[in-house]
Image: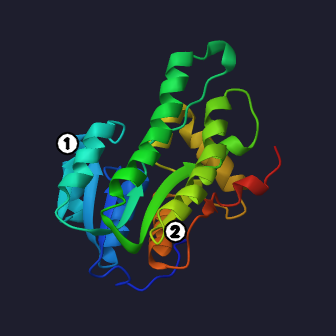
């Protein structure tokens, strides 16, 4: 696996890992690597067909069709888990881009509120299920750190999630809470957002990133597994963008 962090192949042996958003992209890659490291994986996704296709590859101990934005359903999911778990990672959520002139304020409010509610919901409803020294891990981004037209809502979430993570790490201790902030990652979500501009974006990143390649889901998954295994890590945000933030505007 190119570019992955080193780990022992059985680092998660006997541990249960819940992956929310496991049907594709970073979530699927994390489910796959957690299983390869000995973990017992619970795969959660909102689309039953895509989830079943992903589960056929990963062979999890359990699957659940859940829209994580549905807070009541999210609560029932954690209540119905048959036993304690060691790690929960949520990859759910997507960026929102729109200049102010074209912005639908109701849509912006919904997007911002749902993302915060989802993060808080995972923290609140999993707290009685995650073992001490286990992990809550969220996926955010780095793209909103630089001001730009159309980035207002995403920038606000980019700033909010690290603060939320640090506070949750104190409130939920000894459970560990961390955030992965990713730059561009070559996923189906990226493909849907960029459309016919995807290949041009890939070529631009291959030419300009210090690592001279595009960051993929497996890179982020390897970092996620490392954070799960290292019990000294909590309350922090870990960037993974191939050096994208080092480049000038």
179 with respect to 212 (left or right): left
Say which of 33 and 67 sits in front: 67
Q: In the figure, 240 relative to 104: above or below?
A: below
Mark 1 and mark 2: Cα distance apart in space = 28 Å
Which residue appears farthest toward the front when viewing the image?
171
Residue at the spot 65% in from the left edge and 55% down from the top edge: 206
Q: Give the secondary structure at mark 2.
A: helix
- Residue tagged 1: 49
Residue at the spot 28% in from the left edge and 38% down from the top edge: 72
Residue at the spot 65% in from the left edge and 60% down from the top edge: 242
Give the label on residue 223, or none.
Answer: 2
Residue 20 visible in this rendered orientation of the protein: no
Indicate the position of residue 168 as horizontal and vertical percent values.
Answer: 52, 57
The image quadrant of residue 133 is bottom left
The answer to which of marks 1 and 2 sits earlier in the sequence is 1
160 with respect to 127 (left or right): right
Callout 1: 10 Å neighbours few (<14), some, many (20+)?
few
């Amino acid at each position: 696996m190119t570019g992955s962090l080193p780990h022992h192949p059985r680092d998660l042996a006997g541990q249960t890992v819940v992956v929310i958003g496991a049907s594709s992209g970073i979530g699927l890659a994390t489910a796959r690597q957690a299983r390869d490291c000995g973990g017992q994986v619970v795969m959660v996704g909102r689309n039953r067909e895509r989830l079943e296709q992903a589960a056929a590859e990963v062979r999890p101990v359990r699957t659940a069709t859940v829209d994580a934005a549905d807070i009541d359903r999210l609560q029932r999911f954690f209540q119905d888990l048959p036993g304690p778990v060691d790690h929960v990672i949520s990859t759910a959520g997507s960026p929102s881009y729109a200049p102010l002139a074209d912005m639908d304020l109701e849509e912006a409010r919904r997007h911002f509120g749902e993302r915060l509610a989802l993060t808080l919901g995972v923290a609140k409803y999993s707290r009685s299920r995650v073992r001490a020294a286990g992990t809550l891990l969220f996926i955010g981004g780095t793209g909103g750190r630089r001001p730009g037209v159309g980035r207002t809502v995403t920038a606000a979430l980019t700033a909010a999630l690290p603060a939320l993570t640090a506070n949750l790490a104190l409130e939920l201790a000894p459970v560990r809470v961390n955030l992965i902030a990713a730059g561009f990652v070559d996923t189906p979500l990226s493909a849907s957002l960029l459309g016919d501009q995807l290949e041009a974006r890939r070529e631009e990143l291959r030419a300009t990133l210090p690592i001279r390649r595009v960051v993929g889901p497996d890179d982020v998954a390897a970092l996620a597994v490392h954070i799960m295994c290292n019990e000294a890590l909590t309350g922090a945000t870990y960037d993974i963008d191939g050096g994208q933030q080092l480049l000038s505007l």
